[in-house]
Image (cartoon, helix red, strand yellow):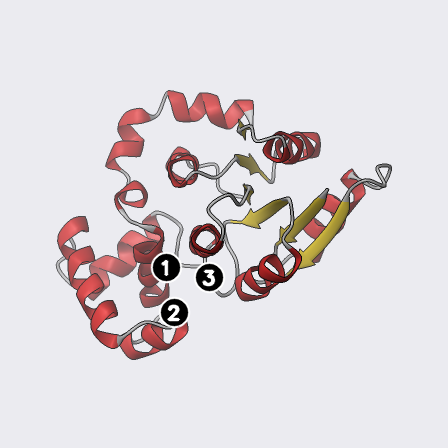
Amino acid sequence: MRVLIVDDHPVVVTGCRALFTSDPSVEILEAFNAKEGHRAYLQKHPDVTVVDVRLPDLTGFELSRRIRKDDPAAKIVMLSVSEDPAYVARAVEMGVQGYVSKSDDPRLLAKAIWKAAAGERFVSPRLAKATTFASAAIKASPLTQMSPRELEILRLLARGERISEVAAELGISYKTVANTTSMLKSKLGAKNHSDLVRISVEIDLHR
């Protein structure tokens, strides 16, 4: 089994390797940002890809969207420091196979990877329980109201990038970004750019 780990923290990649050191049937591949991860996926075709939600260049949601666009059958497990039920719900809604918190027992990540490889889904029990009892909060969260592309545009705008810079970063037209920004303001009830930044900070998307 080939497992691609996309995470910008070397200690996480090392920890993932350690989970499978005693199993020679598992090969661990690594990438430290979303663009490297996307390239590695297309070149190596891993059986399971573990994606950090927060990457330095794109969100894990956007990377997952790009991978699934190229390969709808891709098996993805999300790994995150965020335990916000809205993040879990968003990931499940996107069709990823698993979601595990970085504060969970590492053995749960190994379990999620094996489950994903077998075509099954796995959310760490603690997060699954929290998500079940937070349905109202999840529905109200801006996170679940946006597509992965909208999330990425919001994150980049909140980092101070201009519309032209966002367009160049994502490889889309200026008009697309401008129109999406207007739609985001309407969808999220934001009066101006500052409101969009505030919302990004509130859902911890701005880093």
Vertical position of residue 122 compared to residue 181: above or below: above
Measured in 3D between alpha carbons, the distance from the residue under mark 1 to the one under mark 2, in whole angstroms, is 9 Å
Residue mark closest to the camera, 1 vs 2:
2
Q: Position of residue 8 (x, y in %)?
A: 62, 59
Name the residue tied to disc 2.
170
Dot 2, crowdedness within 10 Å: few (<14), some or many (≥20)? some
Which numbered tag is attached to residue 58? 3
For the point 29% across and 79% down, the residue is 164
Question: Which SS class for mark 1?
Answer: helix
Horizontally, residue 99 falls left or right of residue 14, namely left
Question: Which SS class for mark 3?
Answer: loop
Vertical position of residue 114 compared to residue 167: above or below: above
Question: Which SS class for mark 2?
Answer: helix
Marks 1 and 3 close (CB-CB < 8 Å): yes
Vertical position of residue 105 compared to residue 204: above or below: above
Name the residue tied to disc 1.
152
Please, what is the three-letter code of the amino acid marked with disc 1? Glu
For the point 50% across and 54% down, the residue is 54
Image quarter of residue 110: top right
Which numbered disc flags the more N-terminal residue, 3 or 2?
A: 3
Please, what is the three-letter code of the amino acid marked with disc 2? Leu
Which numbered disc flags the more N-terminal residue, 1 or 2?
A: 1
User: Dividing the image into 4 quarters, which one contains the C terminus?
Assistant: bottom left
